[in-house]
Image (tube, helix red, strand yellow):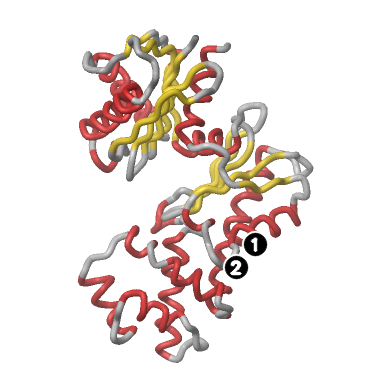
Amino acid sequence: MNYVLGIDGGGSKTVCVLMDDLRQVLGRGEAGPSNYQSIGIEATLQSIQLAVHNAVEATIITKTVNIDAVCLGLAGVGRAADIEVVKGLVQELQNNKSLSITWALQPANIIIVNDALIALVGGIGQPVGIVVAAGTGSIVFGRNHQGHTKRVGGWGYILGDEGSAYKIAIAGINAALKSYDGREISTSLREGFKQHLDLESIEDLIEVVYRREWGVKQIAALAPVVDFAAASGDIVANMIIDDAVQELVKATSTVIDEIFTTDSVLEVVTTGSVWRSRCKIHERFAASLVKKFPNIRVIFPRYEPAYGAGLLALQTTQN
């Protein structure tokens, strides 16, 4: 029996699954964030070690686990230099004597990829298709049967992230302020933001955003205000949502045009908080995309990204 580890490391948490070669999850563990670009190498190593420890401790296997392969899908890992850093982390992991693991890793059995690929593989259950991630930020990533990949977006909140919760929230705030000024038509977003943030006046947004030094995540968390207004029939809010949907459709279409054919039969998996909306963003996106590409099927994730990492690790033991 082959045992592998699949690790999903992001900006908020790290998840590790221990799997056998029947694709069964035998143990799962969580720990803190592991984006080394933002928290540093040492903190990243600690999170990964703890997630692995928790996964192994959760198994029903009574003896020491022999690990034949490992896949790490980490946020912020995209360049060759990043991969070398993570290889060092894997070596440190193998040197940790406190883990109930014996390692049988060869270079070919150590897979280091970005988190978009494991979200794709986990979401669909195989390494072919497209993932459209729209949460605080946004990115579209695809991989075809030949192994060719294409990424669109993922440029961050200043340079891109169209269709993300952050961009939806910012557009909503802009619309509310323009309405208050009289520059644009009236919208319920003015009252929506006031109630949500318990403001006496929409002008108090200045104090909230600037003086409290709100960051990307705090602003992105206001996207549900726009979603609620759109679901309630607000014209301005629905225009914002439609713009976000079309940006995501455009990005997905670009991936299809680049590495697939227009008549390809494939699945597109949607991940992230934006898709859990009251105003049916998922349905709007699917309808618009299928209109352009009739053979596309838009789905929610079948499995979590860590499971996708485990599947990629298993592939190396079966070649």
Above or below: residue 313 compared with residue 239: above
Q: Based on the displayed image, in which of its 4 quarters is residue 318 positioned?
A: top right
Q: Give the quadrant of the C terminus.
A: top right
Nearer to us in this view, 32 or 91: 32
- Amino acid carrying label 2: it is Asp
Residue drawn at x 54%, y 71% as measured from the top left: 240
Residue 102 rendering spot, x and y as whole percentages: 33, 9
Q: Which residue is mark 1?
A: 284
Q: Disc 1 or disc 2, which is closer to the eye?
A: 1
Q: Which residue is mark 2?
A: 242
Residue drawn at x 21%, y 31% as measured from the top left: 42
Residue drawn at x 48%, y 21% as measured from the top left: 313
- Amino acid carrying label 1: it is Arg
- Taking 190 as reference, is 43 left or right? left
Residue 104 rendering spot, x and y as whole percentages: 39, 8
Label located before the other in sequence (1 or 2): 2
- Taking 69 as reference, is 203 left or right? left
Q: CA distance from mark 1 to mark 2?
A: 8 Å
